[in-house]
Amino acid sequence: MRYITKLLIITVLVACVLLSGCTQPSANSTASQTPAGDNRVQKLVIGTTNKVEDTNINDYYFGTFSRRLTHQALVTIAANGDIVPELATSWDTSDLKTWTFHLVGNATWHDGKPLTAQDIKFTMDYRKKNDPNWKSIFGDLRSVEAPDDRTVLMTLDKPDFNFLINLATYRILPEHIYKNVEDPKKFNSPDAWIGTGPYVLKSFDKTTSLLHFEIYDQYWGQNPAIDQIDIRYFANTDTMMLAFQKGEIDTPYGYATGFSPFYVPKLLDDKDIGIMIQKNNGITNVLWFNENKTYLDSKTFRQAVSYAIDYEEMKNIFTAGYGSIPDAGLVPQCTLYYKETRPLTYDVNKSKDLLDAAGFKDTNGDGFRETPDGKKFQPVLSTRSDMVDNVRAVEMLKKYLNAVGIDVQLKIMDRTSFGNSMDFDKTHEMALARTTYWGMQMGAGYGSGYIDQRIYGWSMVNDSKFQTTVDQLTSTIDKDKRKDLAGQLQDYYADEMPAIAVYNMDIIQPYNKNYAGWVYNPCSGILNYDTLFYLHKA
């Protein structure tokens, strides 16, 4: 998968200028005709287990849905992975440090006020003050200027090849609304719903978490193909899939994930249901080691764990033929500049030998190993309670690790607590969590953002060799050098094992066959501009 448009890279090499909007239609394109009349979709009902708690900009899943329907960014990610225009019609840079964005001239907020460059400057300054993730994503953004209403100038402390990827996820906010909002976590009124996107959020039922969207009739781009969209929350996937089979919803949706293969046989029997199978550009489940924790900083220990896991059993149980085992280099095979590294193999004897070599031995005869200095060793393995497969998977990992003498303790946490421990507090020891398409590309790409303690840092790696490679990859545009550096990162993962890709599952996305024009996007899934603008009655 490309990290940036091919034309964009070529332009840098030839003219030292980056241009956009040349290889893909933009968000307001009319390349295909929007369905009209009887072919239009009057109402689309989407089911999800992604619960919206409140409609403020800090609510994770409200952000997920609003980014796709009501709020826009400077750029977006197309179905083929290219970066394409959204609120910016084009952009240019000569050094990957100073970026100039040229805005659309007719975009308005849902209350009718025009979008200006000052809104972009305000958004970046405001989120820097209020967004706890800011430093991880935009820590190198030095300044944002708005020299006129249609031009935004962003200056970084150092070159960043992946800067556009980060911008693609960042919703622009209206200054005239948020300039008086001191605590965005408490701002849940309808004014918090105002964006520039093709849909307006008309209502939110906090009791049921039902969100109701309607077309914004003054939208600056082309008209969407769907008049109304309901996003309906379900407490569990089984209930949602039953509603789908009954025709109560038109598609199930999960951010950056597909659905269990065990639903497929029943769905295939229904003539009104279709199924997309897509390669996963993230990784379904990864075992992360926090290298800031005592004993987990041992490379030999982490390698020993990698040989304790029965990957084939995990793949067969959780993917049912729709999955694969990534190699030790972590990166999915569909990634640009993927490099084959050693396969992840199950070898209990080798795991035990490595643990012995690292000094983890059963000194008291209770069947479990103590630390090299003779202390009781009970590393904690955590995961999210709302992801059923993860709960089952950590139980299996506990079984494997017990078999080699590691007395692992499980900690099942709600999504918010788990996120806080991983993203902010860094209190986790070992953790099982997926990666997303966007997550694999943040930092220098290739999962480096998850590994590098300077970014998200789930593995909290603070190795100068690793970070030098990350910085070189971030700052270079030379294709051959990028390929070499990407390979170096994958070799590093395979040797140091800061994380283990336990298994990966293809994206399984069911949909209502009575509508045609469904498109799957690697970043936003089935809920994307192609679907919103061109879905029609079959």
Image (cartoon, rainbow, N blue to C red):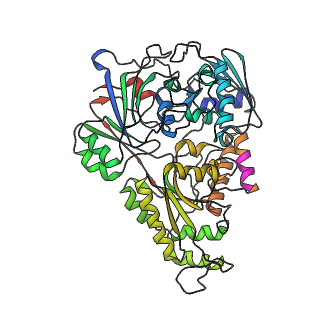
From the top left corner, tell me how far across and down residue 123 is, in percent.
64, 27
Q: In the rendered view, tell whether residue 254 sits above or below residue 97.
A: below
Q: Is residue 416 above or below residue 294?
A: above
User: Is 83 drawn above or below residue 395 in the view shown?
Assistant: above
Q: Is residue 325 left or right of residue 260?
A: right
Q: Position of residue 106 (x, y in %)?
A: 56, 12
Give whichever of 478, 391 is nearer the camera.
Answer: 391
Task: Tell me if I can see residue 200 in this picture.
Answer: yes
Vertical relation: 463 (above or below) 110: below
Q: What secondary structure predominates along the stretch shown in magenta?
A: helix
Which residue appears at 46% of the width and 68% of the height? 310
Residue 39, quarter of picture: top left
Which image quadrant is residue 293 in? bottom right
Tell me which corner region of the image, top left, top right, bottom left or bottom right, holds residue 461: bottom right
Range shown magenta: 465-471
Residue 421 % position (x, y): 59, 53
